[in-house]
Image (cartoon, rainbow, N blue to C red):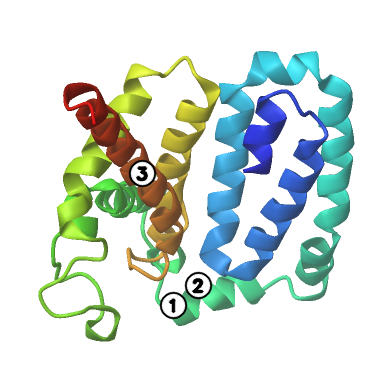
Amino acid sequence: YYYLLYRSGKPRALYASAGMAALSFYSYSPARMVVLVTALLLFLSDFNYHKQHRDVVLRTVGLCLLLALPILRFQIQHPEENVQHLRQLGSYWIENHPLQEKLAHYGREYLRGLNPGYWFVPNEIDLSRHKMDGLGNLLRPALPLWLLGVLICLKNLRSSPHRALLLAVVAAPSGAALVALGSTRALCMVIPAALLCSLGAAAVLDWLQKRWQP
């Protein structure tokens, strides 16, 4: 939200965006990768706009360095903790396999996280305690609205807010794929999915209003 305010002509909103990114980063370990990937994608997506507001961007970089001090301090004091955490989760990254095989494994997990079938159709991937019998992770009747929202964003790809929404979807499974896809690890997908469904619903309502005037 604050990033889109920044992108819509309120440059100082980028500071609040950095603060929200830090809160997300520290909230849950898979969110670290999601935040970093999202920041990188948004930086590349709106690079020309960032150049126009380079002073704000540079100050935001300084703020991000300040907000990163807790994780830097933790890494210095506990350098083996991340590897230990991955070992507890049974991540394939700590196994004795070639890097190419690990990257391929990551790609498979990541693509499964982008598959609408995983989100809208009952699956056998998630743990039983994370599922409700006969239901997908997201409301199945909303799938057409989700697809319509994706099409609207693709049609308006020159628009920064539409690109940002698609990039949020692209980034969402990046953290979960480091271990294994799961609804809790990829929970941040719910936010862009809800926004895509809202875009689709708004388009349907607009079409109905034009077709059948009150």
Spot occupied by residue 132 in the image (x, y as percentages of width and height): 20, 79
Cα separation, mark 3 vs mark 2, equals 36 Å
In the displayed structure, 97 sits above or below 213; it is below
Dot 2 amino acid type: Leu
Task: State the residue at coordinates (24%, 34%).
Answer: 204
Viewed as shown, does residue 126 lie left or right of 24? left
Closer to us: mark 1 or mark 3? 3
Q: Nearer the viewer, mark 3 or mark 2?
A: 3
Callout 3: 10 Å neighbours few (<14), some, many (20+)?
some
Disc 2 element: helix
Query: Can you tell which mark lies on residue 198?
Result: 3
Q: Secondary structure at mark 3?
A: helix
Name the residue tied to disc 1. Answer: 89
- Give the numbered dot on residue 86: 2
**Number of marks in picture:** 3
Amino acid type shown at disc 3: Ser
**Residue type, numbered disc 1:** Leu
Instruction: Please name whichever residue, 170 or 101, is drawn nearer the observer in this view of the structure.
Output: 170
